[in-house]
Amino acid sequence: MTTAPPRPDSPYQSYVYAYPHKTAYRPLPERPPLRELWAGEPQHALSLYLHIPFCEVRCGFCNLFTRIGSPEGLTTAYLDALERQAAAVRAALDDGARFALAAFGGGTPTYLTAGELERLCDIAERRMGADLRAVPLSVEASPATATADRLEVLAARGTTRLSLGVQSFDDAEARSAVRPQKRAEVEAALGRIRAAGFPVLNIDLIYGIDGQTEASWLRSLDTALAWRPEELYLYPLYVRPLTGLARRGEQESRSAWDTRRLALYRAGRDHLLAHGYQQVSMRMFRRAASPQAGAGEYACQTDGMVGLGCGARSYTSRLHYSFDYAVNATEVRGIIDDYVATEDFHRAEVGHWMGGAEPRRRHLVQSLLQAEGMPLADYRARFGGSPAEDFPAELARFAQRGWLAAGDPAFLRLSPEGLAHSDAVGPMLFSPGVRALMAAYEAK
Ligand SMILES: C[S@@+](CC[C@H](N)C(=O)[O-])C[C@H]1O[C@@H](n2cnc3c(N)ncnc32)[C@H](O)[C@@H]1O
Ligand code: SF4
């Protein structure tokens, strides 16, 4: 493993789950009022995201915005701040604003106690006006924090999808990824989750861990399959700056690691396809005929997102905004302490203006990386024209590498090899401006 930049031809450049990446956000000197940002935005099918930046441990691979533990009173103070922020954000939205989708993410939302989770749901419902029992609600959990009392609260409040971070069912691999957990604890957590009766269980697994072989990877997958999860996310391991694994240094040449990850991806994909799963994207697989706890009527390409909490982003059509971002423990603590002390949440502080062709690029990134591809009619209806007219150089490069599927003139779709190279395709669609901002960002 290594944290040096990926080789230019590596399939693993970066995971593009949102465009642009937070490292392209900058302080907004104008501090635009939220009321102005949301005025005139469609608000009939918003998404609500609440971020809980606490974990019991810091896993060696993780660069998410989170801290280990919370000193006395911090989670209460954090929920107090969330409540203040919710009030300010709700006041900036139209009276008729409606949420079509909700999610609690982290960090580890289930780091909160059962009572605190009740309060979190109350904030979403009473402060924001989200009807959690009527819309899809997804919650992330770790095995140790997926306790019966917390799961009971989450089920009663309307959680439709419980996503458990497992990473590996092999104790030696978990140790190697610096993920302190035992398989027996993970299986016990899965038992509690199934007993709580959520419509959708998702399991996160990671491939490319030191010491992981195709045989051990398939064993982990089979252990997961025994729980018949409605969804599985298979993540290629990334070792990012300032994480525990990065400090441990290089264990394997970069080209060997790339080759191993690609082989494990193919083995995992084929295994799940053979077991009745459909591929939704490079990482996501859904069991055939399982309920969709996903977006519902919310369309991630066009509809707005309201994020609450100091690691959450919010999207309007013109601005993506958030708070400051860090990985280093001291920096993260400082940002959470600042958040908790904030009284005035009426303005956006850090973000990226979506000018020029950026909305087109974002639409393309978000649609093309889905296995079903992008309906060209949707693009034309939204922007006029076509991706071939707007991004000829990028599409020519994909075609040259064999990453585009032929055959259906109504869709722009990746070929199976294109999908396998999603983490190279996405970054190739970044604008020069976003690229420059990301390159200039200093990890902290
Ligand atoms: C918020 S966590 C999931 C919930 C919970 N905190 C846990 O770890 O159990 C999001 C997921 O992203 C994946 N992930 C995070 N960092 C990663 C990395 N560097 N490489 C690969 N996958 C990663 C992991 O599978 C993890 O479960
Ligand atoms: S992987 Fe999950 S539990 Fe581990 S540090 Fe990241 S957010 Fe926390």
Image (spheres, rainbow, N blue to C red):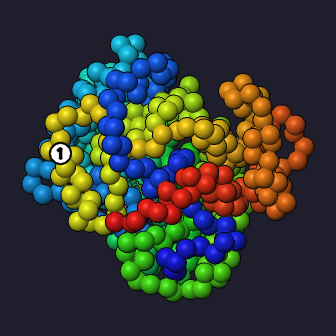
How far across and down, in percent of the image, does residue 102 sit?
A: 42, 33
Please say whether residue 421 is visible from this viewpoint. Answer: yes
Task: Find residue 222 and report its image quarter.
Answer: bottom right
Task: Find residue 125 and report its image quarter.
Answer: top left
Of residues 48 and 430, the one nearer the viewer is 430
x 20%, y 34%: residue: 344
Of residues 414 and 5, the one nearer the viewer is 5
In screen coordinates, is 143 left or right of 300? left
Ligand 1: image quarter: bottom left
In screen coordinates, is 198 left or right of 14? left
How far across and down, in percent of the image, does residue 7 sit?
A: 64, 75
In screen coordinates, is 24 left or right of 128? right
How far across and down, in percent of the image, does residue 10 sit?
A: 66, 71
Task: Find residue 294 and report its image quarter.
Answer: top right
In screen coordinates, is 359 left or right of 56? right
From the image, which quarter does the C terminus lie in? bottom left
Number of residues whose C-alpha sits closer than 10 Å to that of mark 1, classed few (under 14), some (14–19) or many (20 or more): many
Q: Amino acid at mark 1?
A: Val
> In the rendered image, which residue does mark 1 sit on?
340
Residue that protrudes farthest toward the left in the picture: 72
How far across and down, in percent of the image, does residue 381 sit?
A: 72, 24
x 18%, y 52%: residue: 337
Q: Secondary structure at mark 1?
A: helix
